[in-house]
């Protein structure tokens, strides 16, 4: 019985990972409401997040750990050069053609500390 439970857990994990490889349900996505970043989403149901080009996008970075005196954060704004729509793990530049987000976006994180302080870098590039 214990082996059966382990195999069921493995199968569930594999299915969850494969879901992002399935084609986007474009018909279902097109019927969802669109919510611009920074506004209140609907209380019930799902929605498509719209990040408009050249509009301020709130940014909050939280740093935590045992070396610190407590959680600390920095807030600000950033702007995107292009509109993007996001639904779960799919993204679109035109809200018509949906791709797995990993096919459209390249996200990279790096960081380190030197005499100037803690330096964190986040890269967000378009693949297409």
Image: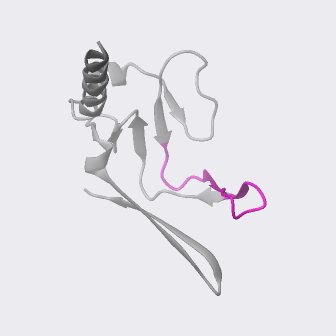
Q: Is residue 54 magenta?
A: yes
The quarter holding residue 73 reads bottom right
Rendered location of residue 42, percent (x, y): 58, 21
- Residue at 56 percent across and 15 percent down: it is 44
Residue 79 rendering spot, x and y as whole percentages: 54, 58
Residue at image position (61%, 18%) is 43
At a point 33% along the width and 41% down the height, the residue shown is 92
Horizontally, residue 62 falls left or right of residue 54, namely: right
The residue shown at (21%, 30%) is 23
User: Quadrant location of the C terminus?
Assistant: bottom left
Residue 90 at what x, y percent from top left? 33, 37
Indicate left or right for 35 with 82 as reference.
right
- Horizontally, residue 32 falls left or right of residue 119, namely left
In which quadrant of the rendered view does residue 11 lie? top left
Magenta segment boundaries in residue numbering: 51-75
Instruction: Give percent across and percent down for residue 58.
Output: 63, 50
For this orientation, the residue located farthest to the bottom is: 115
The image shows residue 54, relative to residue 8, as above or below, that is below
Quarter of the picture containing the N terminus is: top left
Residue 52 falls within the magenta-colored stretch: yes
Q: Determine the residue located farthest toward the right in the rendered image.
A: 69
């Amino acid at each position: 019985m214990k082996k059966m439970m382990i195999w069921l857990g493995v199968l569930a994990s594999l299915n969850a990972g494969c879901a992002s490889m399935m084609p986007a349900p474009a018909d279902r996505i097109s019927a969802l409401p669109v919510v611009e970043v920074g506004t209140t989403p609907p209380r019930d149901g799902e929605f498509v997040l719209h990040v408009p080009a050249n509009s301020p996008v709130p940014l909050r970075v939280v740093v935590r750990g045992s070396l610190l005196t407590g959680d600390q954060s920095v807030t600000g704004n950033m702007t995107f050069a292009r509109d993007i729509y996001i639904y779960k793990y799919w993204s679109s530049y035109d809200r018509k053609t949906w791709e797995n987000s990993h096919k459209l976006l390249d996200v990279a994180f790096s960081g380190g500390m030197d005499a100037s302080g803690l330096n964190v870098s986040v890269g967000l590039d378009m693949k297409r």
